Image: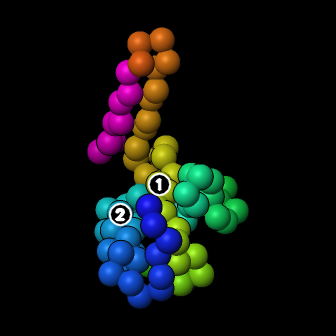
Amino acid sequence: MENLETNSPQSNVLLEQALQHQARGWSIIPIGRDKKPLIEWKRYQTERASPEQIKQWATQYPSMNIGVVTGAISGIVVMILKKTVAQAVILLP
């Protein structure tokens, strides 16, 4: 993904996607190109960022990508089975 400038069409699309995921009930965090969190993220295992917080991150980290904290907070379980090279994402009700 290219470096995103604040208020560029791409950064606006990314922000809108992050806000849609948050509205879906997913716990969203900003991550870098290397998929590592740009913030201390442990608290987002038990609480979701507000839309205002996500907007602040988008301003603070204009080239951020979107990370979703999986597990109970987001209702998402991810399984990667190495021996069979199978991957599954399960969305819990």
Q: Do the residues labelled 2 and 1 touch (CB within 8 Å)?
A: yes
Q: Quadrant of residue 79?
A: top left
Q: Residue 55 placed where, x, y %?
A: 48, 82
Q: Which quadrant would the N terminus be assigned to in this image? A: bottom left
Picture residue at 56% right of the left edge, 52% below the top = 35
Q: Which quadrant would the C terminus be assigned to in this image? A: top left
Instruction: Please name whichever residue, 2 or 75, is drawn nearer the observer in this view of the structure.
Output: 2
Residue 6 is left or right of residue 89, and the answer is right
What residue would you read off at disc 1?
Answer: 68
Q: Which mark is residue 21?
A: 2
Three-letter code for the amino acid on which mark 1 is drawn? Val
Task: Report the magenta residues as a range.
Answer: 86-93
Q: Label 2 vs label 1: CA separation?
A: 8 Å
Three-letter code for the amino acid on which mark 2 is drawn? His
Name the dominant secondary structure of the magenta segment: strand
| Element type at mark 2 | helix
